[in-house]
Image (cartoon, rainbow, N blue to C red):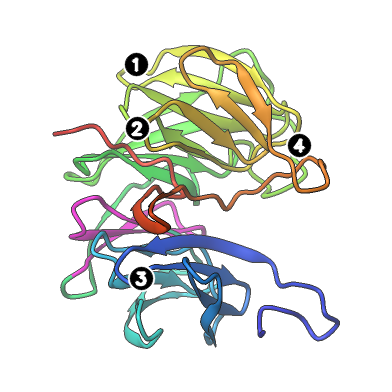
Amino acid sequence: MKGYHKDGTPSNVKGVAVSLATNSIYVSTLETLQRIDITSEKVVWEIPFEGGCDRMSISPDGKTMYLPSLEKDFWNVVDCASGEIKSKIQVFTRAHNTIIGMSGTKAYLADIGTPFLNIADTKTHTLVSKVGPFGGGIRPFTVNSDESLVFVNVNELLGFEVGDLKTGEKLARVTVEGWEKGPVRRHSCPSHGIGLTPDEKEIWVSDGHNMRMHIFENKPPYKQLTTIPLQDMPGWVTFSLDGKYAYPSSGEVIDVKTRKIVTLLTDEDNNYVASEKMVEIQFVDNKAVKIGDQFGLGRAPH
């Protein structure tokens, strides 16, 4: 497999996403994109992409992927079945995280190198607008279900900012109170990881230096509700589809309602494990029928 370096060590995984249309899970590494059949668990194909691969997103119909280059100035639009490049979208400087909204009509493209979030039309695969400027380069972000608001982590901020996806304006800057931002071991960003609970009532924000998850009410002025200590530095957070559990990348499984840590993820040898690349897949009769996402997207009905 191409997902390994010449010395036999595996390549760094950058993203994971699922398509029900192809019954496949996709894994992006620094150099390649892998398609793995969910039922057989066999690699269908693995394709190297010029410029590398970062954290991608798949359209709700499961047919199209927006695959960012590895912090280069473009996104590839990829056919999920074949892996062929359908189009290329030029951005400003450093392509990174990607979300295709619940409607499937817009793709949100985060550029680390600028304070703007780019928005592309998924029919024409062209940039149509942008949101910002925010307070720094865009890091992890999430979007509510009606695609009216975006919640972003930005460089140098322990907290998050809020943007209006319709008008393009920044609406708020929210700083975590009571905690110093301090140095972090990974990502060079005080808050690298943000998610909405599926009911969109709360915003969960990572705190790398203090190894905590801070929870905010999702309505202005974004009241800070509580904080949860973690076993390691969090760099991501997502949620179960039913909204009962939060999964910070530090390896805990947290009961959203009680705020209690119910278990720690372990491997077959009972070692603690952690990952920033997690996605929920629900099965019926060994067939994938429902999927979550990497990003902690809002799922409230509208």
| Part of the protein shown in magenta | 99-122
> Where's residue 168, x and y in %?
23, 46
150 vs 53: above or below: above
> Quick check: 105 left or right of 53?
left
Q: Nearer the viewer, mark 1 or mark 2?
A: 2
Q: Pointer 2: what residue?
A: 198
Mark 3 or mark 1: which comes first in sequence?
3
The residue sitting at 53% across, 76% down in the picture is: 34
The residue sitting at 56% across, 76% down in the picture is: 42
> Quick check: 237 left or right of 68?
right
Mark 3 or mark 4: which comes first in sequence?
3
Q: Amino acid at mark 3?
A: Met
Front-lying residue, 123 or 231 = 231
Q: Amino acid at mark 4?
A: Pro
> Quick check: 156 left or right of 137?
right
> Where's residue 76, x and y in %?
39, 78
